[in-house]
Image (cartoon, helix red, strand yellow):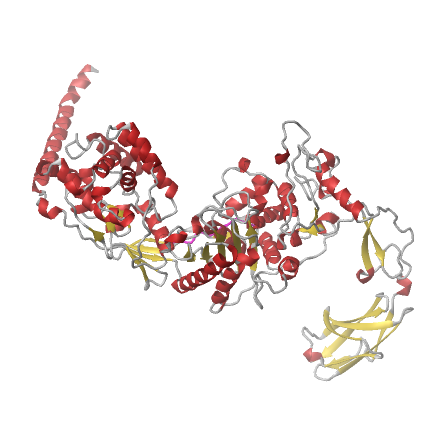
Amino acid sequence: MLRKMRKNAPLRKKIVLFLVSAGMFCSGVLLLWAATIKVPDLKTIDERHVTQSTKIYDRTGEILLYDIHKDVQRTVVPFDQISRNIKNATVAIEDAEFYEHNGIKPTAIIRAILINIGNFGFEQGGSTITQQVVKNSLLTAEKKITRKLKEWILAIKLEQVANKEEILELYLNEVPYGGNIYGIEEASGAFFGKSASDLSLAEAAYLAALPQAPTYYSPYGNNKDALVERKSFVLKRMLELGFIEKKEYEIALKEDVVFKPQSQFGIRAPHFVFFVREFLEKKYGKEFIEQGGLKVITTLDYRLQEKAEAVVALYGKENEEKYNAHNAGLVAIDPKTGDVLAMVGSRNYFEAENDGNFNVTLAKRQPGSSFKPFVYATAFMKGYTPETVVFDVKTQFHAGCDADGKPLFESVKEDDCYMPINYDELFRGPVTFRNALAQSINVPAVKVLYLTGIKDSIDTARSMGITSLTDPNRYGLTLVLGGGEVSLFEMTGAYAVFANRGIKNPSETILSIEDSAGVIMERKEPKPERVLPEDITTKINDVLKDNEARSPAFGERSYLYFEGRDVAAKTGTTNDYRDAWIVGYTPNIAVGAWAGNNDNTPMEKKVAGFIIAPLWNAFMQEVFKDMPKEDFKPFVVSKNYSLKPILRGEWLGGESYFIDTISGNLATEYTPEETKKERFVTDVHSILYWVDKSNPLGEKPENPENDPQFNLWETAVRKWVGEHNIALSGVIPSEHDTVHLPEYFPVMSIQNITSEALYESEKQLRVEVSGQSKFGLQKVDLFINGRYVSSTTKSPFVFSFVPKNIDGIAEENEIRVVGHDSVFNKGEKTMTLRIVF
């Protein structure tokens, strides 16, 4: 072994020498390359590095929505004219060791390298303020190792030719604060209407919080809470670093900072554009989006966007005057692709008094009854039907309270008891799921949620795109009435799944992105996913477009109705009248609209059908001017007598029998369907008596009282039965149908043709039919080869036809006649019909 090691020693020595030599060579080359990199004169370094501007277009690629660097606003100010507050705040949050390092922080670089290796990319940079000056002013946005090496080298060299004050001055005059605002002087004026020298501590903390993600943290966007948190974090870091005293910190935390209204600049569809820009910055980084020269083709249909903005502005103003609803929003999505076609986040983006720059379509709000379809869809998946009956009666739902709403235990407070009411404060007794959903009746909906289950209902909503409801344990039975908070954007996308027959296409805003060289960086790829069975969406669509079913609540010609169009829709109004919703759709488009106040103050006490439905209807009318008509797949309701009566619309009892309506006796196997009628042994109970909620299609529960809700529901139903004087009965007729018997069936005969004769195909054939019946022959039907040909109700019963004109006629055919008497007894006769061609 020792001899072997000695033998390999020269080889190992050669490898070590090679590696050392290679390392020295590479280091030399790197040092030589580094020596060639020059730092520009400080007098010119603050001349902004002009790069190609990223442009955002509509779906045609022709209408420019936003040019990120168009009309860039920037004012350079010397270091002594910049507030100490913003200097310290910036250092505290961006680079706490700024005054100690020599341009780079080796530990941060190593950490960034390790993260990049782990991510197989080159995103992390561990940038100091000095590096950011170099990056923003001297380098392009390309993401290459050589660029990062240049950044490190130039940062070190910059520290050698400039002092810390000069570098910080360069940074503060260069840094982007959002939109087209660059540099601290421009930001101070744009946000607070003052010079950078006059910034208060709290104002400085806000501005220092912005550069990390100016679009996300924008005071004019939807993440103001996040901006406040980051501002507080900036102040905390300043305190920890000794830049401010404890008293200053506490005063600044409480300071009420007011931002100036956002100034209008060249932009179309601003809510949509900033939504897209924020997405791009999260995915590619702020620097790359600002300097990469990208061409972004979005999904926006600007023609529809203009109509949406006009409608929201018009009706939004009317709603303010009529209903104290100061704001409104609208989203339109193509169900077949997931493309966002229009997004209007307020009445007017630049209307400061109504907080117009806030995008309400992304805000989390309570959806009211517009959440109900997800619960009913879940119920249908479990086996319930649109004809299932529950009782709309005054019902207590808290198991710790009695049926009258009084606590049963000391631990239960009276406020814990839950007895919801309907929007009109009326109760209708037995109602079907169809009518309850179409008319948006609350008490049945709460019962449907209990039967279906909160967790399963949330799972259905989540599969369709509702991501906000993350904790099923947080919500009670009020969930079905809008107890959770969701956004209009995700609600509209989820309803699009109903429109698209159960197939979800994720809501998308970008069709393609090209880099500055015209190379496609990404292109939208369809990602369809079936999340609901098609038959379930067919049922939901049929209910939500059923104008007859919703008419008792909305009227026959409501804003939800469109002559000659299949349009499904659902409204929602929160109990406190803070939110009015409507989401409606056809197979081609899903449109959601909202009205209310951003500060959550209530509107006038009107339902969504009055407040938001007119706005939605006006937009849909504009859409339909150019959109082809497309109907939903029809839903055919058929009686399935294998289902429990309560599941097919019958609520009088669970035991049924059939009578013959003519004789009044029990139907037999000979009783025709026309005279059969189902009757029930009157025995009225709540649905929990007949159905095990965990298995509605299974057997009737043996001990329904074991369900914690049973006694509460049952007590309310028994009270209703008593108030309506419904007598319980169990008398089933003992006699059987004596009218429909084989001996009474018509006896039929066919004259004028025989089975042996041959008849020419082109000559008219006359068939005469006669019959004998106790109850008189009323009608005769003619069939050839099993296909219906015609009927006659006039005696004598004669049929004339040319054989060759009959579909499916052959050389040998079966001719059949069926006779009907006055009580629907039937008799038939068949024979062979031979044809010569």
Drawn side of residue 447 relative to residue 158, left or right: right
Magenta segment, prevailing SS (helix, strand or loop): loop
Q: Nearer the viewer, residue 774 or 557?
A: 557
Instruction: Give residue 639's quadrant in the image.
Output: bottom right
Percent across and percent down for residue 94 are 25, 36
Please state the horizontal and vertical placement of residue 99, each as a whole percent of the image.
17, 31
Foreground residue among 122 and 131: 131
Residue that extends furthest to the bottom in the rendered view of this protein:
763
Magenta extent: 524-532
Left-right relation of 773 to 442: right
**Residue 346 in the image: x percent, y percent?**
42, 55
Decide: is 152 above or below 754: above
Quadrant position of the N terminus in the picture:
top left
Residue 150 in view here:
no
Compare residues 584 and 554 and report the one nearer the observer: 554
> Of 142 and 305, which appears nearest the observer?
305
Left or right: 459 as drawn, with respect to 271 = right
Q: Position of residue 697 (x, y in %)?
A: 69, 44
User: Which quarter of the image is occupied by the C terminus?
Assistant: bottom right
Instruction: Tell me what residue is drawn at x 80 percent, y 62 percent.
Output: 674
Relative height, residue 116 to residue 609 (above, below): above
Q: Is residue 12 shown left or right of residue 530? A: left
**Residue shown at 52% from the left, 58% from the top:** 322
